[in-house]
Image: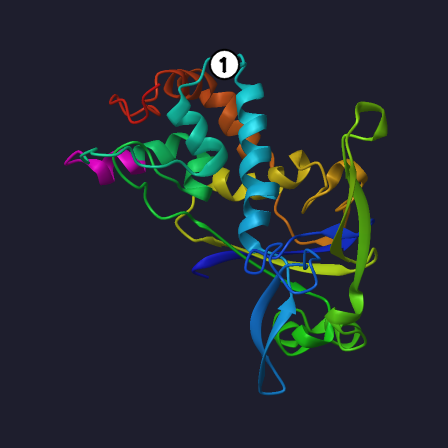
C-alpha cells in the first residue's frame, strides 16, 4: 500500500457553530450562515452545509500537537522565535525578500526527520516552503447529500446518511452582545446557524507512505491532545464533539521519538534551526 488511511467518526454533543467563509455576515438575512461547499445534488449545483477540512487540520492536528511538543520539551512561554511559533501554530510564512538556500531540499528533509509534526503537516520557514506535508484530510457530514460518497468510503454508514438532509440539521441561535445598560451601552442581537447536536461527521485521514513511523503515530496522539471542540462559540458550549469510533494507529512511536530526541528537538526550536545547523526561522 502506498499510503496509510484511517477513519474517525465524530458526533456533535452540542450544536456546532461554523461560519461560512464565502457569505460571511454579508447576506440577505443578516444571519451568519453555516459553512457550505459547492457540490452537485441530483445533477444540480448546490451549496451544501459542510465542515472545513482546513479548520479541522488546525484544530485537531496542528495546534494540539504543537502545544504538546512545546510542553513535553519543557520550553518556557515566550522563548521561541516568532517564526518558529508561526510555523508550529499557523503553518509559517516566508519573509519578504528572503532567498532560499541552495540546499533547501536537504534542509527540509532533515527538519522533518527530527520533527514528526513537520513531516506530517509541513509549512514554511523564512526563506522557503518545506517539503510537501504527508497528511491529507477529507470529511463528510453523515447526511443524504453525501450518501453517494459515503457509500464508497464507509458503506456501513450509507443507510444512516440517506435518512436525513444536511439542511434539516440546521437551526438558528440568537445571542446578544454589547456593553449593557449599566455602562450606558446598548445590547445588540446577532444570529447564526448551527448544525444540530447529534450530527455525525466522518473523517478520512490519509498519510503518505514515506512518512516516518513517528509521524503516522502523531496522527493518533493529536486526537489524545485535542480538547474535543470544533468551530466557533466554544465559550457558549458550542462545537463539543465525541469520538464514536476510529481506526487510528497506536501513538507510542511518536512519544518514543520525543523521548529519544528531546534535547535536539528543543535546541532546534529555540535557535530556529530545526536541527539543520542553519537558522531557518528568525526571532
Region rendered in magenta: 101-109
**Residue 147 at x, y = what percent?**
68, 76
- Tell which of 25 and 103 is nearer to you: 25
Q: Quadrant of residue 177?
A: top right
- Tell which of 8 and 252 is nearer to you: 8
Q: Is residue 2 left or right of residue 128?
A: right
Dot 1 falls on a residue whose secondary structure is: loop
Q: Quadrant of residue 98?
A: top left
**Residue 32 at x, y = what percent?**
68, 55
**Residue projecting furthest to the left:** 102
- The residue to which callout 1 is attached is 78
60 versus 82 height, above or below: below
**Residue 89 sits inside the magenta stretch:** no
Asked whether the viewer can see residue 261, the reply is: yes
113 versus 22 height, above or below: above
**Residue 68 at x, y = what percent?**
59, 27
**Residue projecting furthest to the bottom:** 43
- Residue at 68% across, 59% down: 34
Q: Quadrant of residue 265?
A: top left
Amino acid at each position: 500500500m502506498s499510503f496509510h488511511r484511517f477513519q474517525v467518526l465524530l458526533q456533535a454533543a452540542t450544536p456546532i457553530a461554523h461560519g461560512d467563509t464565502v457569505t460571511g455576515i454579508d447576506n440577505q438575512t443578516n444571519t451568519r450562515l453555516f459553512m457550505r461547499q459547492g457540490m452537485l445534488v441530483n445533477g444540480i449545483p448546490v451549496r451544501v452545509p459542510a465542515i472545513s477540512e482546513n479548520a479541522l487540520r488546525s484544530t485537531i492536528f496542528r495546534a494540539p500537537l504543537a502545544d504538546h511538543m512545546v510542553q513535553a520539551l519543557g520550553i518556557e512561554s515566550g522563548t521561541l522565535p516568532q517564526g518558529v511559533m508561526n510555523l508550529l501554530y499557523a503553518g509559517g510564512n516566508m519573509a519578504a525578500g528572503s532567498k532560499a538556500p541552495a540546499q533547501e531540499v536537504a534542509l527540509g528533509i532533515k527538519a522533518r526527520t527530527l520533527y514528526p509534526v513537520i513531516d506530517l503537516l509541513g509549512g514554511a520557514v523564512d526563506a522557503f516552503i518545506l517539503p510537501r506535508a504527508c497528511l491529507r484530510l477529507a470529511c463528510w457530514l453523515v447526511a443524504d447529500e453525501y450518501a453517494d460518497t459515503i457509500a464508497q468510503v464507509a458503506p456501513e454508514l450509507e443507510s444512516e446518511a440517506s435518512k436525513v438532509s444536511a439542511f434539516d440539521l440546521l437551526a438558528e441561535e440568537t445571542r446578544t452582545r454589547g456593553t449593557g445598560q449599566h455602562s450606558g451601552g446598548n445590547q445588540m442581537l446577532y444570529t447564526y446557524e448551527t448544525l444540530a447536536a447529534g450530527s455525525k461527521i466522518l473523517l478520512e485521514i490519509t498519510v503518505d507512505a514515506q512518512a516516518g513511523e513517528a509521524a503516522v503515530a502523531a496522527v493518533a496522539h493529536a486526537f489524545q491532545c485535542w480538547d474535543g471542540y470544533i468551530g466557533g462559540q466554544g465559550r457558549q458550549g458550542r462545537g463539543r464533539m465525541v469520538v464514536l469510533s476510529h481506526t487510528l494507529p497506536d501513538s507510542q512511536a511518536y512519544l518514543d521519538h520525543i523521548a529519544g530526541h528531546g534535547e535536539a528537538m528543543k535546541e532546534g526550536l529555540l535557535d530556529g534551526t530545526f536541527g539543520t545547523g542553519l537558522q531557518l526561522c528568525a526571532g
